[in-house]
Image (spheres, grey):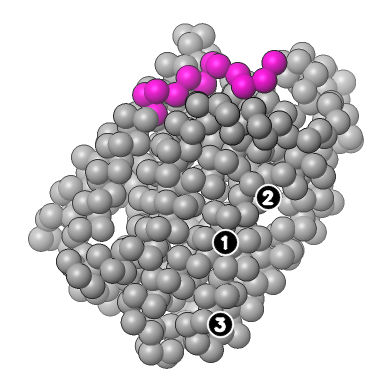
Amino acid sequence: MITYMDRVVISAAVPSIQKELGLSIVAMGWILSSFRWGYALFQIPGGWLGDRFGARRALTGIVIWWSGFTALTAASFSAASMAIVRFLFGMGEAGAFPIATRSLSRWMLPTERGYAQGITHAGSRLGAAFTPPIVVWLIASYGWRTPFLVFGAVGLVWAAVWFWYYRDTPEEHGSLNDAERALIREQLGGAAKRASKEAPWKAIFAARQVWVLSAMYFCYGYSLAVYLDWFPKYLIAHRGFDLKQMGIYASLPLLAGVVGDFLGGWLSDRWAHSSGNLRRARRGVGTFGFALASLCILPATLTADAQWSVVFTCLAFFGLELTVGVSWAIPLDIGGDFAGSVAAVMNTMGNVGGAISAAVVGYLVQGYGWNVPFLVSAALCVTGSLLFARIDASRKLFT
């Protein structure tokens, strides 16, 4: 939740930041892109940290880092200073989901992975959904800088709780009983108790399936960034909503995404459990989610009615998020104890897509209007569906 709260604060504050600092839409696009380049470039180092030092220490450290730079965003006084701070913020957040995936790898049974990842990512979208109304209220009451200070403090509290509660293996956690430990050990084949080892990067980079997975996630990351970074601005600039209305309507697609996150992972796990066919269970949900997103983006973009645009956007975002729990379960399925590193490669490509999207949308809007960025996303969702149909989650990278 906190990862997305901290990154969505700025999208909800874009109109206020532009007004005070006198920034063009292209300059704002590069500021949003700077976070995503930091986030993309440090995915693999972040995944390595989790595999090398364990999720408990690594996640504590990076949350403290990015929470500090969330707060420092409030000290920005120009486009350049804000871009630098947001790049450093992105560096910290980069390890969040790869390390979170690593933290699940030694705890979740194979038939729980899609749902567990769905819960994790539903939490992120729920945080993003709650954020715009809170940010709008804080901006109206105290100015645009205050939300960054508030959300930075929340992350520091979480880091302390995580370090106190989480343990890297079931054997280290005092709350488990012997039967639970035995069940996890039996289902994971001893992976839950192995010591950390260096990731086999050569084998990971040589695996064709990793690159198909990464290309699919590029399509997802580009499309996601269009909504996370630009949808609040779109509602005001193109659909005619005021600031308070934007705070409400910008949250609705994210709430639909929460449902998609929960449902996608759960459906895939239930399908895999009942059929015994993991490949079909992962592919089926992923390809359908992308296809639904592409179909719904079109009427959302082309309708003249602002209310119906939001309705179809909710359906599109629901479809896009159906793919997420499944996508993040696949590194666990194929990567085993090195799931964090596989997830880092996948998420690097996803956030390269997001970084390109954040900057390109500003130019597309300036040159062609608001419809074109969403039509590009629809085309990428079709591509993502085709790529998902080529992924085989039953083929493990390591034995």
For label 1, the residue is 38
Horizontal and vertical percent position of residue 238 = 20, 70
Q: 386 or 208: nearer the eye? A: 208
Return the disc, 1 or 3, that comes first in the chain's sequence.
1
296 sits to left or right of 340: left
Element at label 3: helix
| Residue 312 to residue 73: above or below | above
Other-residue count near label 2 (Cα within 10 Å), few / some / many at <14 / 14–19 / ≥20: many
Return the disc, 3 or 2, that comes first in the chain's sequence.
2
Return the disc, 1 or 2, that comes first in the chain's sequence.
1
Q: CA distance from mark 1 to mark 2?
A: 11 Å
Horizontal and vertical percent position of residue 7 = 52, 64
| Residue 224 to residue 51: above or below | below
Q: Identify the residue at horizontal 59%, vertical 75% (top origin).
A: 85
Rendered image quadrant of residue 90: bottom right
169 sits to left or right of 287: right
For label 3, the residue is 81
Horizontal and vertical percent position of residue 280 = 42, 16
Rendered image quadrant of residue 12: bottom left
Residue type marked 1: Gly
Q: Identify the residue at horizontal 42%, vertical 71% (top origin).
A: 30
Q: Identify the residue at horizontal 69%, vertical 71% (top origin).
A: 68
Horizontal and vertical percent position of residue 250 = 35, 62
For label 2, the residue is 46
Residue type marked 3: Ser
Which residues are the magenta region? 388-399
